[in-house]
Image: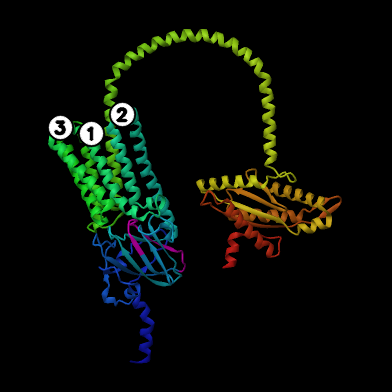
């Protein structure tokens, strides 16, 4: 073979090797990596990474579908994915695994020799990113290529449901997801409180069973979406695994009690009661399996129980509607929605239905619709009770009118007596009120003095900390920028040594006045300590902060301090940090960043302005 041809093959070999690699997205685009993945099944689950890495390409099978779903087989699955960065920049990406209930997920090749190990059967603090889902960071430079191996092992649904997106897209999607999840759980909690309140008033057990049904369904969803492992029991792995089928069976049990009572099955034919008792016994059996038995049978049993109960309730509701029970039509609609949503969720877990946003949240949407319909049906019971009590209320209103007339006469007499008493009280309390007002004014003046620096009249450090915390909270809520200027008088010790400490105090007051004149009324200026000042600027971005800082520095340089016929030249070094706060408690951290920038300004020769962002770029 000619040498030229060998050289050409060597040059083209990387391109051929990575021809099927996944190009990482940019902007708001999201990519499903499923079609780019290859899978190798390990039934024993004993293969090591070194063995899997050495497998020939012929051992790997292409997935060629949107989601990597393999059902409830129980095998260990190794997935291989090649990615590359075709862009001229590296914004950073996230590989988001949309199945929080995976027992174990290992990722190799992300960060040198480090192995990402996570899953709901591993402590939550093992995760690289603190998130309810399994999130893997991808950091590739421009043109860089990377091969990733994923080891997926779970006793539940082996469904990867992965998505690749940029950091910015992930943050945007996370905010939207948390908003929707907050609305969902907020609606459930509102239903729970509403119906529990009605039970406390009416003592109708149907509202109690419905409240328990809503509470257990809320817990079930909290577990399924990964919030429970993150916030409730991050290290209770055994309980977390059994809690999923247990909470499902518990919600089903309360749903049976609720249906039994609201459809008045105790007054219906005996087959209805027989079916209800059998389903109740199955619910207790599944809960027992979840607590003491193997996980997979308990999980499958909980799914079968949900479908069986929903179908039975739907059929019984239709039969009760046919028997003339008018309220049953609403319950039939609710159970039909729940059946459809539960089937979609279960079939997605088995891989029979493709993963999508609709199938992922089908049970949430269906459950919310079902509970809304049930709440409407229960509310109808209150309306009927109100109509039954309408006549009695009319009689009570008439009696109340008579009582009001009598009370009016008594009130008139009491008014005359109270007027004479009030006149005496007002005379005696006038002196006391005047004294209290003087004391209040004195307390206000004292409180204001405690917030101020005695030398410069500026706010002190304690006031700065309080106002900074409020400003960060406001900025985080309104998404408005905030800027912090850390200012230090250059060579101030020399001023004290040369002109005396009284002259130094005059220079501090002079600098405070010059800086305060340049700030807006909404800005805050505080003496941080010694010759250091801090300015807190609301609604100010980096550009505005830099411009103001330069004005302050130039103004102080042009206007020396005049003390006892002496002109004392002063200069100012300024470090600043600006941006939109993402954490309401970021104040002290931002002060530290501005202080770092100030240190760089002083180290660079003083009498200059340095922002923290510019500092970070210089360090790179």
The tag on residue 244 is none
Position of 380 relative to 44 (above/below): above
Q: Are marks 3 and 1 in contact (CB under 8 Å)?
A: no
Mark 3, residue position: 268
State which tag comes first along the sequence, 2 or 1.
Answer: 2
The residue tagged 1 is 261
Residue 432 to residue 199: above or below = above
Judge whether residue 605 can be spotted in this image: yes
Q: Which residue is under mark 2?
A: 203
**Residue 15 in picture, x, y percent from top left:** 36, 77
Sequence-wise, which precedes: disc 3 or disc 1? 1
x then y, percent, for residue 290: 27, 51
Cα distance in 3D space between marks 3 and 2:
23 Å
Taking 178 as reference, is 464 left or right?
A: right
Looking at the rendered image, the quarter that the N terminus falls into is: bottom left
Horizontal and vertical percent position of residue 464: 63, 47
Magenta extent: 88-105
Element under label 3? loop
- Could you tell me which residue is drawn at 35 percent across and 84 percent down? 9
Q: Is residue 493 above or below residue 369?
A: below
**Image quarter for residue 495?**
bottom right
Could you tell me which residue is drawn at 39 percent across and 66 percent down?
Answer: 24
Task: Compare residues 119 and 582 and report the one nearer the observer.
Answer: 119
Q: Which picture quadrant has residue 455?
A: top right
């Amino acid at each position: 073979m000619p040498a030229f041809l060998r050289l050409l093959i060597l040059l083209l070999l990387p391109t051929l090797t990575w021809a099927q690699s996944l190009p990482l997205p940019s902007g708001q685009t999201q990519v499903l990596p499923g079609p780019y993945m290859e899978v190798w099944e390990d039934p024993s689950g004993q293969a090591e990474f070194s063995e899997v890495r050495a497998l020939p390409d012929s051992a790997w099978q292409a997935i060629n579908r949107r989601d990597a779903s393999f059902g409830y087989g129980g095998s260990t699955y190794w997935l291989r994915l090649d990615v590359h960065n075709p862009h001229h920049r590296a914004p950073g990406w996230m590989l988001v695994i949309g199945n929080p209930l995976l027992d174990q997920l290992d990722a190799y090749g992300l960060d040198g020799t480090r192995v990402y190990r996570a899953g709901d059967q591993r402590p939550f603090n093992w995760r690289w990113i603190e998130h309810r889902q399994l999130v893997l960071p991808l950091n590739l430079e421009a043109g860089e290529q990377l091969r990733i191996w994923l080891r997926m092992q779970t006793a539940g649904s082996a469904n990867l449901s992965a998505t690749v997106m940029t950091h910015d897209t992930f943050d945007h999607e996370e905010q939207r997801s948390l908003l929707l999840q907050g609305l969902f759980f907020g609606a459930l909690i509102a239903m729970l409180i509403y119906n529990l309140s009605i039970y406390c008033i009416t003592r109708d057990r149907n509202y109690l069973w419905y409240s328990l049904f809503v509470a257990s369904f809320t817990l079930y969803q909290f577990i399924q979406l990964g919030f429970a492992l993150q916030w409730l029991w991050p290290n209770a792995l055994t309980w977390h695994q059994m809690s999923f089928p247990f909470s499902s069976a518990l919600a089903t049990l309360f749903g049976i009690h609720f249906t039994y009572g609201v459809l008045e099955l105790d007054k219906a034919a005996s087959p209805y009661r027989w079916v209800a008792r059998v389903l109740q016994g199955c619910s207790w059996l599944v809960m027992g399996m979840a607590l003491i038995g193997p996980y997979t049978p308990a999980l499958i049993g909980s799914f079968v129980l949900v479908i069986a109960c929903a179908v039975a309730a739907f059929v019984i509701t239709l039969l009760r509607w046919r028997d003339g029970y008018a309220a049953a039509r609403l319950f039939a609609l609710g159970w039909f929605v729940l059946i459809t949503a539960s089937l979609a969720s279960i079939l997605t877990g088995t891989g029979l239905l493709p993963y999508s946003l609709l199938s992922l949240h089908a049970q949430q949407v269906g459950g919310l619709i079902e509970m809304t319909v049930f709440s409407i049906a229960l509310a109808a019971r209150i309306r009927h009770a109100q109509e039954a009590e309408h006549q009695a209320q009319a009689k009570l209103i008439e009696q109340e009118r008579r009582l009001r007339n009598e009370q009016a006469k008594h009130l008139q007499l009491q008014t005359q007596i109270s007027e004479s008493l009030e006149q005496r009280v007002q005379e005696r309390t006038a002196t006391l009120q005047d004294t209290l007002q003087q004391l209040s004014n004195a307390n206000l003046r004292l409180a204001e003095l405690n917030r101020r620096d005695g030398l410069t009249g500026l706010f002190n450090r304690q006031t700065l900390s309080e106002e900074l915390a409020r400003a960060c909270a406001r900025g985080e809520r309104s998404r408005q920028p905030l800027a912090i200027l850390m200012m230090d008088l250059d060579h101030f010790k020399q001023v004290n040594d040369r002109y005396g400490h009284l002259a130094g105090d005059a220079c501090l007051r002079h600098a405070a006045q010059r800086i305060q004149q340049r700030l807006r009324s909404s800005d805050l200026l505080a003496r941080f300590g010694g010759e250091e000042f801090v300015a807190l600027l609301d609604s100010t971005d980096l550009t505005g902060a830099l411009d103001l800082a330069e004005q302050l520095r130039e103004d102080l340089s042009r206007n020396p301090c005049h003390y006892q016929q002496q002109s004392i030249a002063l200069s100012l070094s300024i470090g600043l940090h600006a941006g939109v706060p993402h954490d309401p408690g970021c104040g002290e951290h931002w002060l530290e960043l501005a202080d770092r920038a100030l240190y760089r300004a002083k180290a660079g020769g003083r009498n200059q302005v340095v922002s923290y962002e510019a500092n970070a770029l210089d360090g790179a």
